[in-house]
Amino acid sequence: MTDRVTQVRDSLESWQVDALLITSAANRRWLSGFTGSAGRLLVTRDRAILAADSRYWEQAAHQAPQFEIHRLKGEKDDTAKFLQMSGVERIGIEARHVSLAEYSALKREKGFRWRALPTTVEPFRAVKTADELAAIRRAARITDDTVAQFPRLARPGVSERALAWELEKVMRDAGADRPGFDIIVASGPNSALPHHRPGARLLEPGDMIVVDLGSEVDGYRSDLTRSFYLGDSPDDSFWTIYNTVQQAQAAAIQGIRAGVSGKAVDSLARDLIKAAGHGDHFGHGTGHSLGLEIHEEPRFSILSEKTIIPAGAVMTVEPGIYVPGFGGVRIEDLVLVTADGSEYLSAAPQSPLIPL
């Protein structure tokens, strides 16, 4: 944590501020270790302060020993007293995380100049430490083991919602603290909806099924998608789409290495899908980083031309094809970016058929 505070202090000059105010939960936890649901960090060149209310005084002192603890007492001048501890005027704030209402309240505090920063510690978070990577690996193993149960659970007449709940129970029994995000089970025509919410639809023979799930371990997430066919004799239309997505993912992973741009990796998958006639059926990015949040920077995207992927980043690779009224296929795995390639963190087999 001390090294992370030093990274912030070393960046204050380039950010053109004398202190940084952190309010977002993920950035707050990454920088201090504090896991409470509310609190603010203030980092200057010579002070690191964590403000928390009485629910968290003891927890904050235990989890963030390198921070001074400022005890918020629900008084009108709580914020003013906290900010005045900085001893500076120019304070940076997280533009992506501070609401208009919060910004208006900050501007009412006298004696401070505020600078909205589009990013703060997010680029530092992109490169995972050994401890972070260990937690992600554990989450990925649990997710692999969970999705391996899906062919046993998926039967005609079972609802999407019931399957999502069964997967969550398997995941928790395997050691997950909780799902890393709401589990997606999308069957039949619903599989053409990339972020379908599991509903009352009952599985039928011949369904295409997209299952997107991840677990959370010690605050860190995993992410995995597998696509299935309920039966043992799909027609050529299914295989054409499935094989195209599988080839697109393999092409993207083959091109991953430290120093490559996010757009370059995205193009490897997107160009192959486009050449197969499904360019209009792939509308999202090819992948994203994750950690304390399920979607982090950097990303594999058409918008990431200037984004350089560093060694030590954990990325998803998840191309898909979604044909309205017919169905969809997405295949997603986690990889660790290395100097000259990548390492698979996901190990679940890509076996789509669920015999009846």
Image: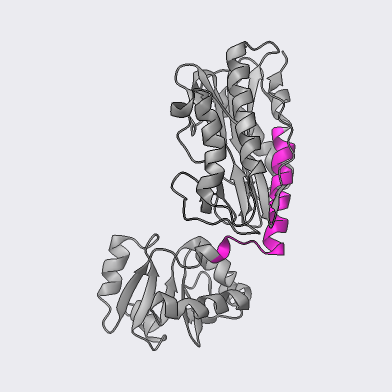
Q: Which residues are magenta?
A: 124-147
Task: Look at the image and say whether residue 126 sits in the magenta stretch.
Answer: yes
3 or 71, which lies in front?
Answer: 3
Relative to residue 191, is residue 119 drawn left or right? left
Find residue 185 and report its horizontal and vertical position in percent: 57, 29
Residue at horizontal 59%, vertical 46%?
A: 180
Residue 148 sits above or below residue 109 on the image:
above
177 or 56, which lies in front?
Answer: 177
Where does the C terminus fall, quadrant-wise? top right
Residue at horizontal 52%, vertical 26%?
A: 275
111 or 122, which lies in front?
Answer: 122
Residue 36 visible: no
Magenta segment, prevailing SS (helix, strand or loop): helix
216 or 77, which lies in front?
Answer: 216
Find residue 73 and report its horizontal and vertical position in percent: 41, 77
Residue 176 sits above or below residue 23 on the image:
above
Residue 69 sits above or below residue 183 on the image:
below
Residue 12 sits above or below residue 320 on the image:
below
